[in-house]
Amino acid sequence: MRRMTERLRQGGVFVWFSGTLLAFCLAMILCLVGFIVAKGMGFFWPTELVQVQTPEGPVLGEITGREPVRGEETAKTQFRVGNRDIYGQDFRWLPTASLSAPEYPKDALLIERLEYGPFIGRIVSLSHEGNQVATGPAAMSGALDRLPEINRVRRHIQSVEKGQVGDLNRRIERIRLSRRKLETRGDAAALQALDDKTAQLQVTYDQLQTSLEQSRTEAKAWTLGLQTVDGQAKELPLGSVVRIVPANAMGLLDKLGVYLSRLWEFVADDPRESNTEGGIFPAIFGTVMMVLVMSVLVVPLGVITALYLREYARQGWLVRAVRVAVNNLAGVPSIVFGVFGLGFFVYGVGGGIDQLFFADSLPTPTYGTGGILWASLTLALLTVPVVVVATEEALGAVARSQREASLAMGATKWQTLWNVVIPSSTPGILTGLILAIARGAGEVAPLMLTGVVKLAPSMPLDGTFPFIHLDRKFMHLGFHIYDVGFQSPNSEAAKPMVFMTAFLLLLVVVILNLFALNLRRKLRARLGGSTL
Amino acid sequence: MAKGPDEILHFRIIEGGGLGGASSLRVIARTREGLEWSETQLDAATAPVWKPLSLAPSLHASAAAWSSDGRDLFVGTQEGRLLDLDPETGTILSSSEFEEPIQSLGFALGQSSLLVGGAKGKLGAFQRVRVKEVFQLQAFHTFPRLDGAVLGFQASQRDKRFLVWSDREAVVDHLTTERRMFSTHLEGPGIAALAPRGDLILHANEATGALHLWSLDAPHPEVSFGLLWGKTHYEGYEKPEYVWQSTGGTDDFEPKFSLVPLLFGTLKGTLYAMLFAFPLAVLGALYTSQFATPRLKNTIKPTIEIMAALPSVVLGFLAGLVMAPLLEKLAVEVFVYPFMVLILAMVIAPFWGRLPLPFRNAFGSGREVLWMVPVLLVSVWLTSLAGPWLERVAMGGSYRTWLQTALGVNYDQRNSLVVGFAMGFAVIPIIFTISEDALSSVPKSLTSASLACGASPWQTAWRVVLPTASPGIFSATMVGLGRAIGETMIVLMATGNTPIMDWSPFNGMRTLSANIAVEIPEAPLHGTLYRVLFLAAFLLFILTFILNTVAELVRQRLRRRYESI
């Protein structure tokens, strides 16, 4: 007994205890990151299509989940059966006990299409303009042969619709606005000129529409006759097929090909089906663009503040108070920044700009509504303490001897700063910037108030004058996660997309952070000492 | 057969129910003998049929009003009683005491709050509300007295304010907040009216025929300090309560802007997060700074830094879509797990003690973390066996029914435990990093002295290092608190966002920050809701400002103390 109390007093047990807690923390982090990586990376790999017999009929699909026996609940298996247009839901839970032995039919297919999620079943026939051309395996190979060409046509249609047609629409809209201005002035000649211009544009517009219509009929000419596993037939134009994946008949290389093409689609394409399918290119683009604009705004602000605090200001209570304030700013909740951005930037400054420069398009706001500029400005405010602190630290790390040497050579204070101090503290400033970017890229709450949207019709950077549109709303990876995961009507089917987006965001943020922290660690090692 | 009325007290058009139902007019009037009422179809040109309504002989009706559906008749008497009658039978459904002869009756916007004015100027509001399964008349607001007998009411068509006047005074009060927004002196009896927007007041003097017009500028009548922070008795509620419900389906909705449930939600989320994060972070930091080998330390710190870098939206998404359903299935296991680890560690400990000391010193000290990882993993496996067993044996098969029957607690899928975990996850790295810095910077001379005096490493760490660095840990906790209070995305996704006030860990909540994120995009610019949300943001700002300033000051003092040692 006495030995026990002595042991307790010595406290070896507690060392173990605190070690356990730490181990738990570390395990949590690794589990979390590993979970996201596994879920995100695995999602694009073609899964085998399993066919089973149930009392209600045959079921064909991917197995997406299993639940063990628990209490009164029996063991269940979750199938992703697809065919939302026919079955009404993508997933089905079936009691495991009632299932027959699984089969892996070679002719089972997963067809990714533009609407209603994937089709899972078999190809029966291939028709051209209503005439059956092939049946059975020949139909499938025929479809596979024609798919690339038809996809090319579809892409062409999309790009024309988005690029040229959108461009024309914008030009007609601009003419309409200037017409409205002229009408109040009553300048007949100018009005006539504008009308001529509109007519010209209308002709180009009609031509475009005809060529588009032609492409559309071309895309619709080929149709697939499909059959689900329980015998329901379905006609599908080949033009709305994205990809045909005969998962059970594929080798490893083919699967890798599908994996890579899906990955590419995810990174480079626009979203489909209210963001639950397709790609997230606009979100990636929006995030990058917002972060870039933020960097442009935050670096001068942060660096100049730090320079003043460190190099020019007399160290007294005022500077101490400013430092406390900067530290405080770092602790202010991001949603508060969002509210500030909404009240000050969007409604205040933006509303003012609209009154002054965009009065003709009022009451439709131009800058008086959320936009990428306001979001970036808000985030710049949010991240400025990071840059200030890092820059101050970097400035402090510049060796005294260097400054003194420069000053002794007759350089002025500014020359010393500009030519000696700032160049040698660049890595520190860069560290601050990268940390700011990592923080900014992951922040969502303030963006929700200042300009992020679930689906932006146009990018903040495009080919129409003035090319950079800072007033436009944008999409964002973080918001995409929130929106697709929590606001989407079909969040179960969208889950993999969310995982993938989360993985991408995590990857970006963690890489940026590791990079910056490594840089900082090296700097500190050079400097030595505590950072408390 | 009644002869017809002397004075009409109140009439109301009752909209016909269903398809093609005809609207009807209900009138209540006073005769010398008592009350009479009639119902006439609006499109039929028939003379009204008056039906008598008898009250007890001790009661003399002085005012009457139909309820919004015409099924109830409210009658005020000279004896100061307010009655709720069934006009068909004449039975008194419920009654209430007003303590003053009732002079006039009126309704606020929505026709559910009955405004009552007395002959000596007393003003009150009553409602029919279900208390213990029975509808009762209940006095739920009182207003400052009026100078003279109350002559009439008129409700605003915009909000819950109303005009009320007597011979000598006209005032505008707000029903919910009981605020008096306007008051003016009158010269003699007359009739007054409130403009539809509630910004103009007109009074016509009966004796002189003089007209007076006043303008009223009261921009946010529905909010007062008491409404934001105190219990308020709302329409349809049994008693005064803290409620947040900013918008409703109808125009006559009474907005409920109590910040208390939101503040409560914020504090609750923060509390659960800190309960989870604080011990893990501080003890983890203590271990890292005092016991871990340098190599281990160099891998732990970057890992924690990665943890700090995780975007909160990712944490929130995991909490809401992965952890919440998982926890719902494995709630018992989660509670069993820590005990399982403890039991397993106690089983293993004696064996470890038997191992030769040189081995223990060479591989054990400083690497306890690594040894514990397999223990944690094995515990997961053991828990997966013990959890269902426990649920079957001790809780009768389903922990949810057990919670419901034994503790009377409901289990929400998105609850405080999930938030505690997820937000704790966000807070741990903050507390860890600052604490670790503080603990590592404790001067070596102190620890060396303690060890040299014969204290064990743990005694040194617990009795010397920890107290010395405690201001640093305090400041770390403050900063962590600040982060938890302001965290938005995690609570938005993992709490279910129901503004309820319940400390139960199995229920959700709505925090100030999530509330702003949910409601401000739809709040009309410069409207009351917009301003209240700004106030909520300001509150968050103040809270975190205080926490951060305290943390910073404490940290600066600690730095000076270290310098002086």
Image (cartoon, helix red, strand yellow):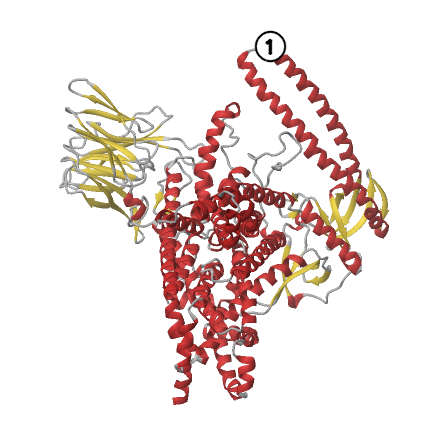
- Residue toward you, B137 or A194: A194
The answer to whether residue A277 is above or below residue B432 is above
Q: Residue furthest front?
A: A409
Above-or-below relation of A168 to A27: above
**Nearest the eye: B356 or B133:** B356
Question: Residue B93's x, y, as percent?
Answer: 25, 45
Mark 1 sits on what residue? A188
Query: How many numbered circles are shown?
Result: 1
Q: Position of residue B468 (x, y in %)?
A: 37, 68
Q: Secondary structure at mark 1?
A: helix
Q: Who's the residue at 80% across and 44% down the image? A: A148
What chain does badge 1 belong to?
A: A
Q: Nearer the viewer, residue A523 or B173?
A: A523
Q: Is residue A108 visible?
A: no
Q: Nearer the viewer, residue A325 or A376?
A: A325
Q: Is residue A287 above or below residue A68?
A: above
**Which quarter shows the C terminus of chain B?**
bottom left
